[in-house]
Image: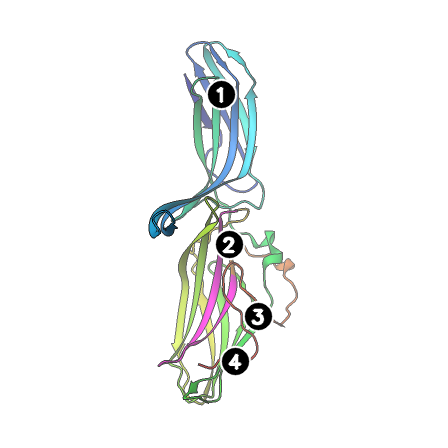
């Protein structure tokens, strides 16, 4: 006896596509069953182990144990009953099916260090008090991040951030170092150039050795058992730098930060166990024992740009201090005082 899933239109699918196929069953003898079913699934799974210490009250000592963390979620679940409970004679049987991918709000398949997202179709001949006959095929989907689906999440108007730092030496403070950052927008598609203007006014007695711009992506993986826990992967997407500013100097920089067209930006729309965010960091490096002056801002990356007729009218606005989505990044604005 065999049970097979055969796709009529195999290949790579996109959101909104219909998957056609059939379940083929070959019985060598009369078979009784509770049903023949076909399942369409989108599943995400996370798993890892960690060594953790705990206090053993019986021995009154600290011990170590291995904890297995995991998470599992079916964000897409469609069941199709092909045949109800009954009996079939020996022979060849075929049952057609079709499933439709949602048009939006579903993640792209993903395979990371701590888990995966995958789509599949599974056929099942449910036999009472016996092993079921099953077959499964993986579906290949490409679900790019389409800005037209999430216009409310995009910051497409110019923004300006400002921060300042006062250098202290032996309790004597010099005049501050001020950094202003100007962005045309905070949402880009891969392959695009981010134009960043930075104005640095250094009224301190210390020189700034260099100015660095880095764009990084963080991917968060989450488990739910035995408790909620997280792991993070960080990836450098783009980097550029320039020489600094001497003491009592001022300089304006105009950076063209190229976002590589081959940047792998996972789409986690509709995912419960995975999410990603990008942060642009602008850092003025101050040599010696002083901490650097830097500004972080969240950047949204995607694959399909917003249609031109949907762009909001240009509007320069000041962004208040708040936490960047998904991280502990602060967005400073207007004369935040540091003294180190």
Q: Is residue 148 magenta?
A: no
Tell me which numbered mark, 2 or 1, is placed earlier along the sequence: 1
- Return the mark for residue 321: 3
Vertical placement of 21 versus 127: above or below? below
* Residue under label 2: 303
- N-terminal of the two: label 2 or label 4? 2
Q: Nearer the viewer, residue 215 or 114?
A: 114
- Image coords of residue 6 (percent x, y): 46, 27
**Mark 2 touching mark 4, by CB under 8 A?**
no
Q: Is residue 335 above or below residue 90?
A: below
Label 3, label 2: how far apart the Cα atoms are:
28 Å
At 48% from the left edge and 26% from the top edge, which residue is drawn?
Answer: 123
SS category of the residue bearing label 2: loop
Q: Work out whether mark 4 precedes mark 3 in sequence or the reverse, and give the earlier one.
A: 3
- Frontmost of labels 2 and 4 is 4
Q: Hey, which residue is sitting farthest right in the picture?
A: 313
Circle on res. 140:
none
Do tag 3 and tag 2 residues touch (Cβ < 8 Å)? no
The segment highlighted magenta reads: 272-299
| 3D distance between C-alphas at marks 2 and 1 | 42 Å
């Amino acid at each position: 006896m065999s049970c097979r899933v055969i796709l009529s239109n195999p290949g790579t699918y996109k959101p909104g596509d219909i998957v056609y196929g059939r379940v083929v069953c070959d019985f060598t003898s009369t078979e009784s069953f509770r049903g023949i079913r076909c399942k369409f699934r989108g599943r995400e799974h996370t798993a890892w182990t960690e060594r953790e210490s705990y206090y053993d009250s019986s021995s009154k000592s600290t011990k170590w144990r291995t904890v297995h963390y995991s998470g599992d979620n079916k964000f897409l679940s469609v069941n199709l009953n092909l045949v109800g409970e009954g009996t079939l004679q020996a022979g060849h049987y075929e049952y057609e099916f079709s499933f439709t991918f949602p048009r939006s709000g579903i993640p792209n398949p993903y395979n990371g260090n701590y888990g995966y997202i995958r789509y599949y179709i599974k056929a099942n001949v449910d036999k009472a008090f016996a092993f079921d006959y099953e077959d499964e095929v993986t579906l290949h989907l490409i679900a790019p991040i389409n800005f037209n689906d999430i216009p409310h999440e995009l910051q497409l108007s110019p923004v300006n951030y400002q921060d300042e730092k006062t250098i202290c030496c032996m309790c004597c403070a010099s005049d501050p170092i001020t950094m202003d950052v100007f962005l045309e927008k905070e949402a880009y598609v891969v392959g695009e150039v981010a134009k960043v203007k930075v104005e640095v006014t250094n009224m301190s007695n210390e020189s700034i050795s260099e100015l660095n711009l880095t764009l990084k992506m963080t991917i968060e993986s989450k488990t739910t058992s035995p408790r909620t826990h997280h792991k993070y992967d960080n990836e450098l997407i783009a980097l550029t730098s320039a020489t600094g500013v001497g003491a009592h100097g001022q300089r304006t920089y105009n950076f063209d930060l190229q976002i590589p067209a081959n940047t792998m930006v996972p789409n986690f729309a509709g995912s419960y166990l995975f999410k990603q965010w990008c942060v642009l960091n602008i850092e003025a490096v101050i040599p010696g024992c002083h901490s650097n002056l830097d500004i972080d801002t969240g950047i949204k990356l995607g694959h399909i740009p917003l249609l031109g007729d949907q762009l909001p009218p240009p509007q320069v606005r000041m962004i208040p201090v708040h936490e960047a989505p998904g991280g502990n990044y602060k967005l400073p604005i207007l004369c935040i005082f540091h003294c180190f």
